[in-house]
Amino acid sequence: MNPPDNPPSLDRIEIEAINLFVQFSRALGQPRSYAEIYGLLFVSHQPLAMDTLIERLNLSKGSASQGLKYLEDLGAVRTVYLAGERRAHYEAVAELRNLAGSFLRQQILPYFHDSGARVDRMAAQTQKLLGERRKHISARVKLLRSWERNGRRAVPFVLKILGGGT
């Protein structure tokens, strides 16, 4: 076992896995630290304690705690209790169906709740515009209404395909 002030360095596989999930997280607009935590847990053959994640990834305690909570709420990480250990340990959940369903329910669906009212307010403000700007903004509002309508239909359909319901 390594001394606490000299955590083991990341090996090439861990680095590649972390970088892969960091790329995904960028596309989804999620913090890098969340992807780093998930990437390391994903390739770890045993559950890891938060202290280990902090040391190995050079994270602050707050960042690690917030990342683990987010990932647990998303269903991407679960807490594992090991016999004889007082600290909680974590492991990655690797079921894409669950991850995608949770992400859609927690990160995408909430944006649809007030989108219709926002588009309505934009449409009302558009009526006060003149000329080309009014024509352009009206077309954009129409496009937004179409996106909202299609999104409201698509997300539940995708959730049903994933087996997560709504």
Image: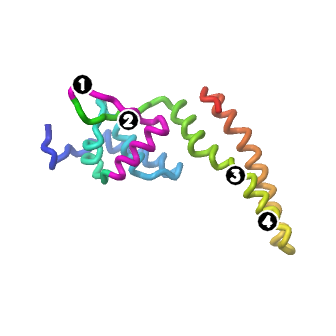
Near mark 1 (Cα within 10 A), the count class, few <14, some 14-19 or many ≥20, is: few
Q: CA distance from mark 2 to mark 4?
A: 45 Å
Q: Relative to 90, is 55 above or below?
A: below
- The residue singled out by tag 2 in the image is 42
Callout in the foreground (2, 1): 1
| Amino acid type assigned to the residue bearing label 1 in the image | Ala
SS under mark 3: loop
Residue at image location 75% in from the left, 43% down from the top: 150
Residue holding disc 1: 83
Q: Disc 2 vs disc 1: Cβ atoms closer than 8 Å? A: no
Q: Residues within 10 Å of mark 3 (few under 14, many from 20)?
A: few
Number of other residues with Cα within 10 Å of mark 4, as a class: few under 14, some 14 to 19, many 20 or more: some
The residues colored magenta run 62-84
Callout in the foreground (1, 4)? 1
* Residue type highlighted by circle 2: Phe
Distance (Cα) linking label 2 and label 1? 22 Å
Cβ–Cβ below 8 Å for labels 2 and 4? no
- Whichever of labels 3 and 4 marks the residue nearer the N terminus, that label is 3
Secondary element at tag 4: helix
**Residue sitting at x 22%, y 31%:** 85
At which x and y percent is residue 140? Answer: 77, 60
Point out which mark residue 147 bears: none
At x 30% / y 35%, what residue is drawn?
A: 88
Mark 3 or mark 2: which comes first in sequence? 2
Mark 3 or 2, which is nearer the eye?
3
Is label 3 or label 4 in front? 3
Q: Is residue 136 left or right of residue 6?
A: right
Q: Position of residue 63 (x, y in %)?
A: 36, 52
Residue linked to disc 4: 137
Is tag 2's residue or tag 1's residue first in the polypeptide sequence? 2
x, y percent for residue 115: 71, 52
In the rendered image, which quarter is residue 131 located in?
A: bottom right
